[in-house]
Amino acid sequence: MICVIDANRFLNSLTLHS
């Protein structure tokens, strides 16, 4: 399962790339 921090970093990347 993906770590919570990993998931947050992933979502953060999408937000920055938006």
Image (spheres, rainbow, N blue to C red):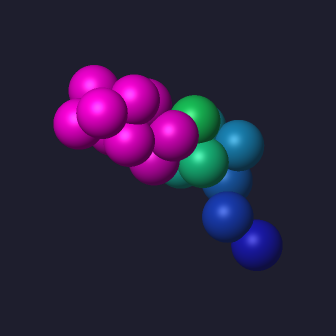
The rendered magenta stretch, by its main secondary structure, is classed as helix
Q: Which residues are magenta?
A: 10-18
- Quadrant containing the C terminus is top left
The percent position of residue 2, horizontal first and vertical second, equals 67, 64
Number of residue marks: 0
The residue nearer to you, when weighing 13 against 4, is: 13
Q: Is residue 14 magenta?
A: yes
Viewer-nearest residue: 17 or 5? 17
Q: Residue at x 60, y 48 (%)?
A: 7
Nearer to me, 10 or 15: 15
Rendered-image quadrant of the N terminus = bottom right
Q: Is residue 14 left or right of residue 8?
A: left
Q: Residue at x 70, y 43 (%)?
A: 4
Q: Is residue 6 left or right of residue 17?
A: right
Q: Residue 10, how many percent across, how many down?
A: 45, 47
Which residue, as the protein is rendered here, is positioned at the far front? 18
